[in-house]
């Protein structure tokens, strides 16, 4: 019996918009792709998600690898942070619907600390309605590392077989399945909600 719905955040409940963030920071249009590659596209962004290195250290590493874009990288972090995500229209209602049906709702997300603190206040109203959350930068592990799933399950005393995990990245869903949870690879809201309804009704999920 399913009792818990676990959502990823980025590109499931919010639209990840690094291009808009870079443009808002005033980066020249000809340099947008290069600045994206130097920031969210770099290996250091994962370290920001992991939370072991602090933000200033990560920015320094990004600048060391792309010194030409030093000022643009700093503006991306200083001025573009707020606009990195935008909640989808369906997100708050989706969570409310699950809770109204008696399910517990949790978040399990790779997310940098300062971004999560800011966005949960001004860009993600649904955060206040969930029953619990595990955010990578706060626990020093990222999906699909096995430890982060275990942290979620242990922290909230969840039975894996009673959980459905929804994430847009297949490898992250595979990690949840290995931890004993049911998994749905998010493609769009309609598809994911249909698959979620199916697994809640009878445990079957149509991947076609």
Image (cartoon, rainbow, N blue to C red):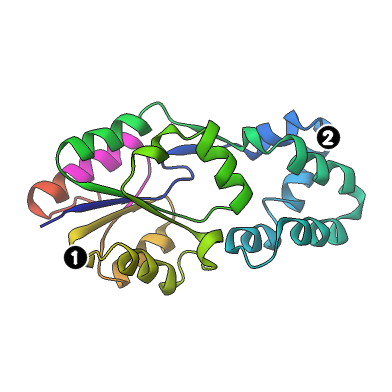
The residue at 44%/46% (across/down) is 9
Question: Residue lying farthest top?
Answer: 89
x, y percent for residue 99: 22, 39
Task: Tell me the quarter of the picture where residue 77 sits.
Answer: top right
The residue at 80%/31% (across/down) is 29
Task: Tell me the quarter of the picture where residue 76 sits.
Answer: top right
How busy is the neighbourhood of tag 2: few (under 14 within 10 Å), some, or many (20 plus)?
few
Magenta residues, as a range?
A: 184-197
Mark 1–mark 2 CB contact (< 8 Å): no
The residue at 22%/39% (across/down) is 98
Where 7 falls versus 183 (above or below)?
A: above
x, y percent for residue 108: 41, 55
Residue 76 is covered by the magenta coloring: no
Q: Which residue is mark 2?
A: 30
How busy is the neighbourhood of tag 1: few (under 14 within 10 Å), some, or many (20 plus)?
some
Question: Residue lying farthest left?
Answer: 202
Q: CA distance from mark 1 to mark 2?
A: 49 Å
Which labelled disc corresponds to residue 180? none
Judge from the rendering whether residue 196 lies leftward or rightward of residue 116; answer left or right. Answer: left
Residue 190 is covered by the magenta coloring: yes
Give 27 or 142, whichever is nearer the viewer. 142
Say which quadrant the N terminus sits in: bottom left
Judge from the rendering whether residue 103 lies leftward or rightward of residue 19; answer left or right. Answer: left
Which of the two discs, 1 and 2, labels the residue nearer the N terminus? 2
Judge from the rendering whether residue 62 lies leftward or rightward of residue 138; answer left or right. Answer: right
Give 95 or 207, whichever is nearer the viewer. 95
x, y percent for residue 162: 18, 60
Give 50 or 173, whichever is nearer the viewer. 50
Q: Which residue is mark 1?
A: 161
Question: Residue lying farthest right?
Answer: 68
Mark count: 2
x, y percent for residue 8: 41, 50
């Amino acid at each position: 019996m399913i009792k818990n719905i676990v959502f990823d955040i980025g590109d499931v409940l919010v639209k990840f918009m690094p291009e808009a963030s870079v443009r808002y920071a005033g980066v020249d249009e000809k340099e947008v792709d290069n600045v994206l590659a130097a920031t969210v596209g770099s290996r250091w962004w994962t370290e920001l998600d992991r939370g072991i290195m602090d933000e200033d250290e990560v920015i320094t590493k990004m600048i060391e690898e792309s010194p030409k874009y030093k000022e643009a990288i700093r503006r991306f972090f200083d001025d573009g942070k707020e606009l990195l995500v935008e909640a989808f229209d369906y997100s708050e209602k989706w969570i409310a619907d699950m809770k109204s049906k008696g399910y517990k709702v949790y978040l399990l997300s790779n997310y940098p600390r300062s971004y999560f603190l800011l966005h949960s206040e001004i860009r993600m109203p649904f955060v206040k309605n969930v029953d619990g959350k595990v955010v990578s930068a706060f626990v020093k592990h990222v999906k699909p590392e096995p430890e982060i799933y275990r942290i979620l399950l242990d922290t909230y005393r969840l039975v894996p077989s009673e959980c459905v995990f929804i994430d847009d990245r297949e490898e992250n869903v595979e990690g949840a399945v290995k931890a004993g949870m049911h998994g749905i690879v998010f493609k769009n809201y309609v598809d994911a909600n249909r698959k979620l309804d199916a697994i809640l009704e009878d445990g079957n999920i149509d991947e076609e």
